[in-house]
Image: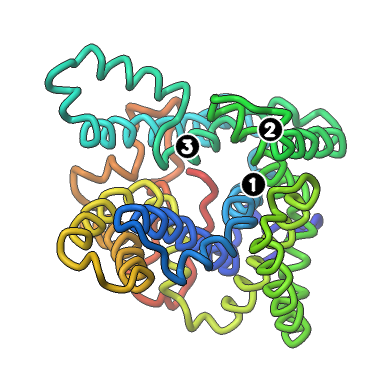
Amino acid sequence: MTPVPDGRPAADSPRVHWVDYAKGVCIILVVMMHVTLGYGEDVHREGWLHHFVRFAQPFRMPDFFLISGLFLSRTIDAPWREYLDRKVLHFIYFYVLWLAIQLAIVEAALLVTQPLAFVGTFAHALIEPVNTLWFVHMLAIFFLVTRLLRRVPAAIVFMLAAALHTAYIARIIDTDSVVISEFSNRYVFFFAGYVAAPWIFSFARAVTRETRRALYALAAWAVVNGVMAFYGLHFWPILSLVMGFAGAAAIVTVGSLLAERDWAWPLRYAGVNSIVVYLTFFFPKGVSSRLAVATVPHWDVALVSLAITALAVVTPLVFHRLIKDTRLKFLYVRPAAFRIIPARQPRSIAGEGTPLMRPPIPSPQVSGD
């Protein structure tokens, strides 16, 4: 990776492997959370994996949003048409497409019996995101807001974003609107990823130089985070921010250490295609959970949840590979008809080019589209 003067990777640099590892960890934690909580509720029991889900709660989504903002500096000053196409319409396309797919399945009865009501449900979901798709919906908003605020001093934007987060945690901001709630709660982490990218990349390089110290620090953080999460301190104002950023630093550390050896390359592959997993895991998760409830409801909840998590992560990756050169590729590659500027080259939503095997040469870093 060839750094530019401010510490960020150059636009033409290869993929930054520690980022892909960090994204891989994040997407697995997200899928695990949905699977574990959902399956536990279905069988009315909890397992030891529920404790791990609670352990990850303070940092699971903060880290995902922080990483999403890391490469924004490379396109923040692009012409408006290019920026809107690659950073806003990009996510709108996939949100609308997968919203239609999910609702057609979840609300199939409503679609058949009351099509007008279905249209109303769909229209409302365009404004207020539903199901697991809220992350994609919020990314489009975050990219747009950050572009609009790019001339405002970063310190002011960060303090305002931190104040919004604190107000949300303190329940000063208390609304049924998913957009308002999630913007207030999450934007500070996305903006921090954008504005603090030079320091984050420097921190990642320092981790690889001080491996032993990094491992000690990681162990200490795990103990402290575990205790604080157990007592619910991540729901306290200020502590929520501290735990979110501390957890993000821990995931950066894990990603950097894994990237040094690259022995866990399947995790990196999941990170490269994290959005593919995020969009698609809903289906294998739902089918597997229902099958498990019907056949093995008395088996260990944690072990069943782990098996479903693995299926929910692997199935989208395999499906993505199978359809990438077929007419179904529009599920992950935005067609020219839905662009306002030509694509630089054919790419998937996640960044095409990484094969389903350990790659001898890293593929190009793709940010957004």
Classify mark 1: residues with Cα within 10 Å, few (<14), some (14-19) or many (20+). Answer: many
Q: Which of 81 and 211 is in front in this view?
A: 211
| Residue 222 in which image quadrant | bottom right
- Which residue does the numbered mark 1 point to in the structure image? 69
Q: Residue 321: x percent and y percent?
A: 27, 59
Res. 351 in view: no
Residue drawn at x 27%, y 31% as measured from the top left:
103
- Residue ranking furthest to the bottom: 212
Q: Are marks 2 and 1 in contact (CB under 8 Å)?
A: yes
Residue type indicated by callout 2: Thr
Q: Residue 81: x percent and y percent?
A: 55, 25
Please tell me whether mark 3 or mark 1 is closer to you in this view.
3
Q: Nearer the viewer, residue 117 or 79?
A: 117
Q: Residue 56: x percent and y percent?
A: 58, 62
Residue drawn at x 51%, y 44% as measured from the top left:
368
Whole-angstrom CA distance, mark 3 to mark 1, is 17 Å
* Mark number displayed over residue 146: 2
* Mark number displayed over residue 134: 3
Q: Is mark 3 on a helix, strand or loop?
A: helix
Classify mark 3: residues with Cα within 10 Å, few (<14), some (14-19) or many (20+). Answer: some
Res. 99 in view: yes
| Residue 47 in which image quadrant | bottom left
Residue type indicated by callout 3: Trp
Residue type indicated by callout 1: Gly
Q: Residue 86: x percent and y percent?
A: 51, 36
Residue drawn at x 51%, y 62% as measured from the top left:
53
Please tell me whether mark 2 or mark 3 is closer to you in this view.
3
Q: Is residue 211 left or right of residue 369?
A: right
